[in-house]
Image: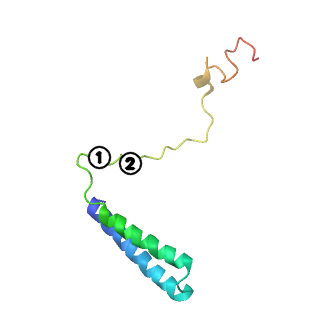
Amino acid sequence: MGVSESRAAVAEAVSALDAAVATLRLHYGDTLGVRRLVSDVVRLGDDLAELGDPQPGHRPHPVRQLEIVPDEPYDPSMWAGAEDEGLGAPDRRAP
């Protein structure tokens, strides 16, 4: 999804949120909670309008891939010669 499509999707979501908050205002009236929601929606719209174009030279972060760790036990030979953390070398005693 490109920048313009992302901004359009956010603008559409903010518009839908604005309509939902307006409906809540009809049911709850002009309460503190409703006024805060209205203010938050306005701020979201203002923030979106202030974004402008991405900074020159800005590269989006690479999409992180989910690393699947299998449930099977590791091969015990992988730990051969390793020290137990906090216990020191195998030929010494822990304090």
The residue lying toward the viewer, choosing from 93 and 8, is 8
> In the rendered image, which residue does mark 1 sit on?
59
Left or right of 24 in this view: 42: left
Q: Residue at x 50, y 77 (%)?
A: 35
Whether residue 33 is situated above or below residue 49 in the rendered picture = below
Alpha-carbon span between mark 1 and mark 2: 12 Å
| Residue mark closest to the camera, 1 vs 2 | 1
Name which quarter of the figure residue 79 lies in.
top right
Whether residue 3 is situated above or below residue 37 in the rendered picture = above
Residue 63's disc number: 2
Left or right of 45 in this view: 87: right
Whether residue 23 is situated above or below residue 14 in the rendered picture = below
Q: Residue at x 38, y 76 (%)?
A: 15
The amino acid type, in three-letter code, at marker 1 is Arg
The residue lying toward the viewer, choosing from 41 and 74, is 41
Q: Residue furthest left?
A: 56
The residue lying toward the viewer, choosing from 44 and 77, is 44
Q: Residue at x 47, y 79 (%)?
A: 21
Residue 34's disc number: none
The amino acid type, in three-letter code, at marker 2 is Val
Q: Locate residue 20, reporting x and y percent.
A: 46, 80
Q: Locate residue 17, reporting x and y percent.
A: 44, 75
The residue lying toward the viewer, choosing from 74 and 62, is 62
Label 1 sits on a secondary structure element that is: loop
Quarter of the figure with the N terminus: bottom left
Left or right of 60 in this view: 93: right
Name which quarter of the figure residue 8 lies in.
bottom left
